[in-house]
Image (cartoon, helix red, strand yellow):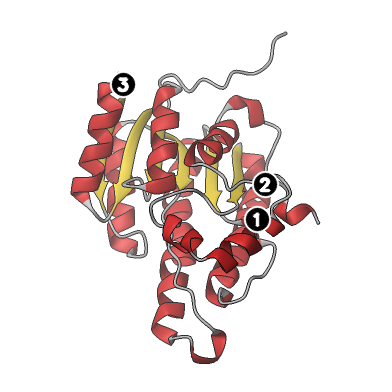
Amino acid sequence: MGLPSERLDGRHAVVTGAGRGLGRACAVALADAGAIVTLIARSEPELRAVASEIELLGGSASVASADVSDRDEIEAAVATAERRAPIAVLVTAAGLNRTGPTADYPLSDWDLLMEVNLRGTFLACRAVGSAMLEREEGGRIVTMSSQMGTVGYPGRAAYCASKHAVNGLTKALAVEWASRGIGVNAVAPTFVDTPLTRPMFEDPEFAADIERRIPGGRIATTEDVAAAVLYLASDRSRSVTGHILAVDAGWTAW
């Protein structure tokens, strides 16, 4: 017997936060592995651009504009996707960060991070998980956590709290749904090279601190993270559930 396949031919994958960054990279990787993909985010123009990119590569993609923190919107988007084809894979890549010292951190920013990073992940998992449970065909769910879901870092109390909570949610859903054939895991990347993070590394002190904390010596690429997501979305991880897969070049190992 050979290894289980990493191909996703004919399977339907839904990706939240698919308009840019990690979500875009995950959507492209899943499509490249043969999945038909539904892209969800707030910005429809960005989704259309990603869908066009996937189609130019020979894949199949549709879009659904929705705010993941809005129950009605995300449930409607998932219902539309489910009518297209039964959902076999969910990747919750929608998320954001607002940094600042805790002593004067705006409560509006705290609430925003919890709304998007935690509530949005929960609502997407619940909507897709409910559809999977009803069909009794199992599936794979991959949440997007962070190394900050395991460690702390100055100026990131809200972000760390939200990602620690995503880890707990991931493990709870894994235990609850394992007997129904649904695997639930998280990918936890280090700082990833994106247009949003590059300005941070223009600060020499910050860049030196991050380099010191990463034994592997480099921040991750979106492709590094997408490769881990693809593994967890495929049959190669069929005996893996409730796991937080660090893609951090060793940050959390010491």
To which residue does mark 1 refer?
A: 211
Q: Which mark is residue 57?
A: 3
Image x and y of residue 89, in percent: 47, 36
Residue 231 coordinates in the image, percent (x, y): 59, 31
Using the numbered discs, state the Cα–Cα distance from disc 1 to disc 2 in whole angstroms. Answer: 6 Å
Q: Say what amino acid the circle numbered 1 marks.
A: Glu
Labels 1 and 2: the sequence-earlier one: 1
Determine whether, in the image, residue 248 is placed left or right of residue 69.
right
| Residue identifier under label 2 | 217
Q: Residue at x 56, y 28 (%)?
A: 234
Circles 3, 2 touching at the beta carbon (< 8 Å): no
Q: Residue furthest front?
A: 204
Quadrant of the rendering where the N terminus is positioned: top right
Q: CA distance from mark 1 to mark 3?
A: 35 Å
Mark 2 surroundings: few (<14), some (14-19) or many (≥20) residues within 10 A:
few
Q: Is residue 236 above or below residue 146?
A: above
Question: In front: 220, or 186?
Answer: 220
Relative to 184, residue 137 above or below: above
N-terminal-most mark, 3 or 2? 3
Residue 47: image location, x then y, percent: 25, 43
Residue extending farthest to the left is 45
Label 1 sits on a secondary structure element that is helix
> Of helix, strand and loop, which one carries label 2?
loop
**Alpha carbons under labels 3 and 2: distance apart:** 32 Å
Could you tell me which quadrant the C terminus lies in?
bottom right
